[in-house]
Amino acid sequence: MVPTAGMDFRRLLAGTTAATAVTALVGVVTATSGAGLTCEARWPLCDGAVFGLFPANFMSFIEWSHRLVAMVTGLLIVASTVAAWRGGRERRVRLATLGAVLLTPVQVVFGAFTVLVQEFVFGYSIVVLTLHFALASTILGLLVAATTWTDAAETTVSAGRIRRAGGAALLAFPVMVALTPRLFVTFGEAAQFVYYAVGFGLFAALSVVALWGRELGARSTAVAAAAGAVVVVAQLVLARRAFGDEGQLAVLGLSLLAFGLTVLAVRLSRRAEPAVAVGAAAD
């Protein structure tokens, strides 16, 4: 089959969404490895050759790589936004990409604050780090929405697809529970990488269930899945600050709550219409 402009845009959007998730994961690795304050606490330069354009050692390389991946992802977000507007995509797709591209500079500023602790005393603080992560999750959510809406406009959305996406989400919960911070395993770098990779996948799957549910007019399904996605983000934020028994129980409790909402969304999806025609209404 000859690729069409629509297929090319879908691939660009899907690639941009994946790159955004990878950027967030590299950020997690940077924080957990203690590399966030390398590069001599300089930004945007680092501490190596060519006047600080390159890293001087492996730890600085981790921080430098995060910045490089973030820069590439930012360019992809700009490209997706331009393609959406120039290609006359649905209004909701254009607005979602616009929201992502407008939030990206704000995210860059918060990223700089986490490094420039000498110039900004509040830089490497819980508040800034939490806002930095929350913004990353918001940008990812907007791109997941744009990708899902683009797919819905060009393919057939069905209750079966909702259940499959919900089933994929349910498969993530055993991993999330098993890797609850310091509950069963030491919450080291490898454990955190897997935990957040699965967590971002879970967030994306629940977002898809919510958006597809809305496409079919299954409001209860959409609400349950959207609530589950919000709970997952709260869980991921809290997991970075969970200390002691209370923190462990709070993260575990959020996992169980999100699991219950996901089960509810899947069960409610059985009431949805069998399918909706290609090119469903945008609003």
Image (cartoon, rainbow, N blue to C red):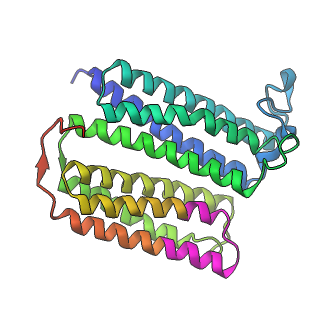
- The single residue placed furthest to the top in the displayed view is 86
Residue 266 vertical position relative to residue 31 in the rendered view, above or below? below
Residue 88: quarter of image? top left
Residue 224: quarter of image? bottom left
- Does 70 sit left or right of 278 as displayed? right
| Horizontal and vertical percent position of residue 77 | 50, 30
Q: How many labels does the image show?
A: 0
| Horizontal and vertical percent position of residue 278 | 15, 37
Q: Which residue is at a point 46% across and 39% down the rendered structure image?
A: 17
Q: In which quarter of the image is the C terminus?
A: top left
- Does 193 sit left or right of 200 as displayed? right
Nearer-the-camera pick, 283 or 7: 283
| Horizontal and vertical percent position of residue 222 | 29, 58
Nearer-the-camera pick, 252 or 171: 252
Q: Which residue is at a point 54% across and 65% down the rendered structure image?
A: 235
Q: Which residue is at a point 40% across and 43% down the rendered structure image?
A: 144
Tell me which secondary structure the magenta stretch mostly adopts.
helix
Residue 204 vertical position relative to residue 10 in the rendered view, above or below? below
- Does 115 sit left or right of 100 as displayed? right
Q: Which residue is at a point 55% across and 43% down the rendered structure image?
A: 22
- The single residue placed furthest to the bottom in the displayed view is 245
Report the magenta residues as a range: 235-254
* Residue 245 painted magenta: yes
Q: Quadrant of the N terminus?
A: top left
Nearer-the-camera pick, 179 or 256: 256
| Horizontal and vertical percent position of residue 29 | 67, 50
Residue 168: quarter of image? bottom left
Residue 183 seen by the camera: no
Residue 96 seen by the camera: yes
Residue 207 vertical position relative to residue 23 in the rendered view, above or below? below
